[in-house]
Amino acid sequence: MSLMEKLERKMGGSHLPNMMIPLIVCYAVGFVISYVAPAVQYWLVFSPELIFRGQVWRIFTFVLCPESSSFFMALITCFIYFSISRGLEQIIGRFRLNFFLLSGLLILVLVGFAYYFVCVLVPGLEIFGSYTVVLNPYYLYGMLFVLFALAFPDAQFLFMFLFPIKGKWMIFLTLIMYILDVGQAFLNGNAAYGWIIVAMIAAAILTLLLYMMMIGYGRPAAPRNVVRMRSYTRQGAAPSDSARHKCCICGRTERTNPELDFRYCSYCVGNYEYCSDHLYSHIHKKPSGET
């Protein structure tokens, strides 16, 4: 049993809603504020020095600071964040999604404070923005695509809604885009913001590594589980001419439709396998008497 499973069992599952929804609302509210009253954003940005002077609300209000000033891009961003969060909620569960988001925001704040203390304590680094650390969760939210790609490495995504790309390449593309953001900041002569971007990317990567450690990603299976899996494979081995995966809704298999992905639903009680077309749209199977 992984650390995540132990934590989820101890806390009794997730009684919170999908935390990405209020974060999207904060993003939209912050975008409106940037247009209606841009001066108010000064009171929302993350500033460790001002936090130590008593303005503790800045620990939370930095999520109201959008990274884009374009209305069209903000609308597309909200739609993408909503879609990817709903998909991940179906795949990994609400508890794990909320853990990723909340732990990521906490790590981002801690990295912001660490960046501030380095700039203050190390002589000559005051030029790197020790007064105001412009944090935003843009790079943390970008890691949601990496989580989705890890779950479906062979699934195709439409990059920029135009170019099909497999999930495993989406991971590298995300990291390349992050590196380009850092390079652009330094090439524009804004070294202070370039290092802040490095700090935010480091926080996002640390969050991903923490999540993977908690779920035991890549950890070898216990010997007793290996024996059980091998026994199950021998007992349920299908003839070579039959399908191994079949959607319990439409009956399609990997042989009739090789372009489809097949997954089991973690919310259904029992071994119910669905194709990618019905994985998110089916009605969850519950024990009799439950709704």
Image (spheres, rainbow, N blue to C red):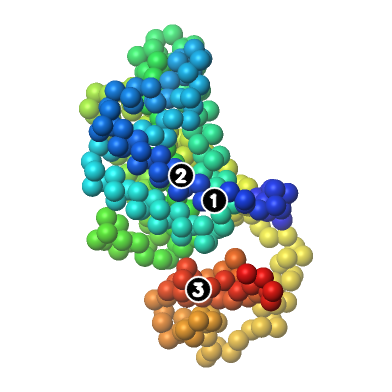
Residue that label 1 marks = 17
Q: Secondary structure at mark 3?
A: loop
- Looking at the image, residue 273 sits to the left or right of residue 156; the answer is right
The answer to whether residue 39 shows anywhere in this view is yes
Q: Quadrant of the C terminus?
A: bottom right
Residue that label 3 marks = 282
Question: Label 2 sits on what residue type?
Answer: Pro
How many discs appear?
A: 3
Where's residue 46, x and y in %? 42, 25
Single out the mark in the foreground, 1 or 3: 1
- Looking at the image, residue 141 sits to the left or right of residue 230; the answer is left
Image mark for residue 274: none
Q: CA distance from mark 2 to mark 3?
A: 25 Å
- Looking at the image, residue 262 sits to the left or right of residue 126; the answer is right
Question: Label 1 sits on what residue type?
Answer: Pro
Question: Label 3 sits on what residue type?
Answer: His
Residue that label 2 marks = 22
Where's residue 261, x and y in %? 46, 72
Q: Secondary structure at mark 2?
A: helix
- Looking at the image, residue 109 sits to the left or right of residue 37; the answer is right
Q: In this picture, is 242 found above or below 227?
A: below
Q: In this picture, is 227 found above or below 39?
A: below
Tell me which residue sits at (50%, 36%) in the image. Answer: 105
Where's residue 210, x and y in %? 58, 43
Asked if marks 2 and 3 touch (Cβ < 8 Å), the reply is no
Q: Nearer the viewer, residue 67 or 154?
A: 67
Asked if marks 2 and 1 touch (Cβ < 8 Å), the reply is yes
Q: In the displayed orientation, state which residue is furthest to the right.
A: 224
Tell me which residue sits at (52%, 62%) in the image. Answer: 90
Tell me which residue sits at (30%, 57%) in the image. Answer: 159
